Image (cartoon, rainbow, N blue to C red):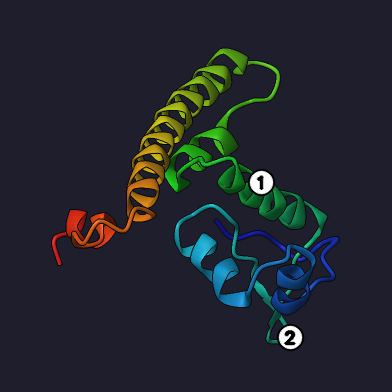
Amino acid sequence: MVRNQEGRSLTIGKLAQAGDVGVETVRFYQRRGLLDTPTRAHGVRRYGSEDLRRLRFIRQAQASGFTLEQIRELLELDAGADRARARTLAETRIAALDEKIAELERARDALRRLAARCRVEDGQPCPILASFDM
């Protein structure tokens, strides 16, 4: 999507800096259709506060574990009318995070058991190394 330059004062570098990302990240989001690409004025694209707000939204949603496709959908939702869909997306993400946490806890517990067995000097190979079948 291309917009006019009215009310826009940030270069892509300043937008990236304000959003705590790199310029290539901004360009990536533009290619994916998550951020608009403004038209050039005197050879330079200018971005505004709405672009920065959207960039920050994308980053916060990513930090919450949403995929870019889920973020695209969230960006398209109407804040007043689409609460149920936003909640469903969040609940789906929470369930995925819960499963990942459970998986990490299982891995931690298995490694703890191996580390405890490794403390015992019994002439056998290290159980940690043996379990990874080196």
Relative to 89, residue 49 above or below: below
- Residue 107 position by quadrant: top left
- The amino acid on which the numbered mark 1 sits, given as a three-letter code, is Gln
Q: Determine the residue located farthest toward the bottom in the rendered image.
A: 43
Relative to 113, residue 53 above or below: below
**The N terminus lies in which quarter of the figure?**
bottom right
Q: Determine the residue located farthest toward the top in the rendered image.
A: 84
Q: Which residue is mark 2?
A: 42
Residue drawn at the location 46% of the way across and 27% of the way down: 98
Relative to 129, residue 81 above or below: above
Disc number lying in front (2 or 1): 1
Q: Which residue is mark 1?
A: 60
Residue 29 as seen in the image, left or right of residue 20: left
Residue drawn at the location 76% of the way across and 72% of the way down: 17
The percent coordinates of residue 121 (x first, y second) are 31, 58
Tell me if mark 1 has few (under 14), some (14-19) or many (20+) residues whose alpha carbon lies within 10 angstroms of its own.
Answer: few
**The C terminus lies in which quarter of the figure?**
bottom left
Relative to 57, residue 1 above or below: below
Residue drawn at the location 38% of the way across and 51% of the way down: 115
The percent coordinates of residue 63 (x first, y second) are 60, 47
Mark nearer the N terminus (2 vs 1): 2
- The amino acid on which the numbered mark 2 sits, given as a three-letter code, is His
Foreground residue among 19 and 78: 19
